[in-house]
């Protein structure tokens, strides 16, 4: 059973990984295109993109609750209720669009945390205001994304991700750099491309739901339901902590760049290169964890505890193997990897000095990511959110600030050491909680 579970997880996780890498590829394209426009436009997408991603993933995290609910219903052979859950997810997506768009139009609280050139700030505001119009489509697509994953249909997401990447490469070049509208639009052109892609992906998802295999089986657009408070309460109870967990984890890394700004541009640049590398590698355990959520959720719904345990064990073994390979790979290829991101010797020295932290924390990060998603599959989300708040914000950010400026005065390495400790603590807290939760569910009649 363990071997079968391992094969199933690999088959499910591989398309998810490709879809996620395609999503990261869109950000890489923005950076590459705007690097040929102006430093101000590049700074705009660096600042505005971070804000947009934090807002999007916090709100999308709430919609991820569609995943464990649908997976358990499918496992319990209650497929007649599955379409209703997706419909309520769409209603919630539209509701959450309102505060999300308002925040993107009024980012004063975040922009006030640091001083920046007035021209850059004006570009950031225009960039975020335009991205706000893609938020309804992006959130509805995230509900669709969770739905497909929960039912073990990730290949359509992979196909849409690859297509979106290809179209964005053309649009971003034409709008931001080539001047299809008479003159290059810079960061605004990249934002416009992102909005167009968001709506195309949403419409493609809707078409596939109507005409594809899941649409034929579940008919999600038939017998459309009005907003249902009972179902909303279930989704929000699970989803709000999930959204907060996403926000906590993302900001625990993005805020470091803000906190180390007094150390100088060289240190910030070196940190940025290593942070990008860490984000890229994180896609491996995240894809595995998303696949594990679907497999364990279906097994819990079917009350097949042997299968649930087999999937958890297989996922932990795969996570450990991936972490080992990733850690060794980063450590052995540190210099050439860093060289891809900069030609500045001083920046390279800073970045290479931080690579060891990324290499070591892969183990804790992979295990805590899998444990967190298994808990989501079991509909346990509040306790993991509290644990991640402690580990990422208190230990990682606050502890990192102390190590950086007040304690041993380690500089930027203090933040990375504190992050490593926080991630290890998260794994130490979430893994026992995961096993206790599974045993408790198994003993429940």
Image (cartoon, rainbow, N blue to C red):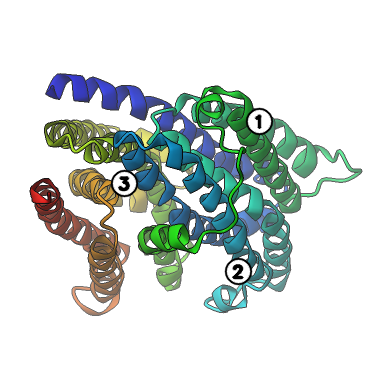
Q: Foreground mark, 1 or 3?
A: 1
- Which is more N-terminal, label 3 or label 1? 1
On the image, which quarter does residue 309 sit in? top left
Residue sticking out furthest to the right? 182
According to the picture, the residue beneath numbered tag 1 turns out to be 207
* Marks 1 and 2, how far apart at CA: 27 Å
Q: Please tell me which residue is depicted at 58% across the width and 32% down the height of the picture.
A: 209
Is 185 left, or right, of 76 in this rendering? right
According to the picture, the residue beneath numbered tag 2 turns out to be 99
Q: Foreground mark, 1 or 2?
A: 1
- Name the mark on residue 257: none
Binning the other alpha carbons within 10 Å of mark 1 as few (below 14), some (14 to 19) or many (20 upward) gives: few
Q: Is mark 2 on a helix, strand or loop?
A: helix
Is 222 left, or right, of 73 in this rendering? right
Q: Is mark 1 on a helix, strand or loop?
A: helix
Q: Position of residue 7 (x, y in %)?
A: 24, 20
Binning the other alpha carbons within 10 Å of mark 3 as few (below 14), some (14 to 19) or many (20 upward) gives: many
- Which is more N-terminal, label 2 or label 1? 2
Q: Please tell me which residue is depicted at 57% across the width and 43% down the height of the picture.
A: 141
Q: Foreground mark, 3 or 2?
A: 2
Up-down relation of residue 160 to residue 147 (above or below): above
Q: Where is residue 350 in the image (x, y as percent from the top left)?
A: 35, 53
Q: Which of 110 and 289 is in front in this view?
A: 289
In which quadrant of the rendered image does the N terminus lie?
Answer: top left
Q: Where is residue 395 in the image (x, y as percent from the top left)?
A: 23, 69
Q: What element carries label 3?
A: helix
- Which is more N-terminal, label 2 or label 3? 2
Q: Position of residue 384 (x, y in %)?
A: 25, 60
According to the picture, the residue beneath numbered tag 3 turns out to be 352
Up-down relation of residue 299 to residue 394 (above or below): above
Up-down relation of residue 222 to residue 279 (above or below): above
């Amino acid at each position: 059973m363990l071997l079968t579970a391992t094969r199933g997880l690999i088959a499910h996780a591989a398309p998810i990984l490709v879809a996620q890498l395609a999503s990261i590829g869109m950000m890489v394209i923005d950076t590459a295109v705007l690097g040929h426009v102006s430093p101000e436009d590049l700074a705009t997408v660096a600042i505005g993109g971070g804000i947009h991603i934090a807002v999007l993933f916090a709100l999308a995290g709430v919609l991820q609750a569609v995943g464990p609910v649908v997976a358990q219903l499918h496992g319990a052979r209650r497929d007649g209720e599955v379409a209703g859950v997706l419909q309520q997810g769409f209603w919630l997506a539209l509701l959450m669009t309102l505060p999300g768009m308002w925040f993107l139009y009024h980012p004063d609280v975040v922009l006030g945390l640091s001083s920046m050139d007035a021209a850059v700030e004006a570009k950031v505001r225009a960039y975020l205001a335009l991205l706000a119009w893609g938020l309804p489509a992006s959130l509805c697509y995230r509900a669709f994304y969770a739905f497909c994953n929960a039912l073990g249909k990730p290949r359509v997401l992979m196909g849409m991700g690859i297509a979106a990447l290809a179209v964005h490469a053309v649009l971003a070049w034409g709008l931001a750099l080539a001047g299809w509208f008479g003159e290059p639009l810079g960061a605004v052109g990249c934002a416009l491309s992102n909005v167009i892609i968001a709506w195309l992906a949403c419409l493609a998802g809707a078409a596939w739901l109507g005409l594809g295999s899941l649409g034929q089986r579940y008919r999600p657009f038939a017998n459309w339901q009005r907003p249902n408070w009972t179902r909303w309460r279930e989704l929000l109870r699970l989803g709000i902590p999930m959204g907060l967990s996403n926000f906590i984890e993302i900001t625990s890394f993005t805020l470091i760049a803000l906190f180390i700004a007094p150390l100088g541009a060289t240190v910030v640049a070196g940190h940025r290169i290593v942070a990008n590398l860490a984000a890229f590698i994180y896609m491996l355990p995240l894809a595995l964890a998303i696949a594990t959520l679907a497999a364990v959720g279906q097994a819990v719904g079917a009350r097949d505890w042997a299968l649930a345990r087999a999937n958890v064990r297989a996922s932990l073994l795969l996570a450990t193997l991936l972490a080992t390979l990733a850690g060794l790979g980063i450590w052995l290829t540190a210099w050439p990897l860093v060289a891809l991101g900069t030609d500045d010797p001083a920046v390279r020295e800073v970045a290479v000095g931080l690579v060891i932290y990324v290499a070591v924390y892969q183990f804790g990060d992979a295990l805590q990511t899998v444990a967190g998603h298994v808990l989501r599959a079991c509909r346990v989300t509040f306790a993991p959110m509290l644990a991640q708040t402690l580990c990422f914000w208190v230990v990682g950010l606050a502890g990192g600030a102390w190590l950086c400026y007040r304690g041993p005065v380690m500089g930027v390495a203090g933040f990375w050491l504190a992050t490593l400790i926080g991630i290890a603590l998260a794994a130490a807290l979430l893994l026992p909680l995961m096993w206790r939760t599974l045993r408790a569910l198994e003993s429940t009649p």
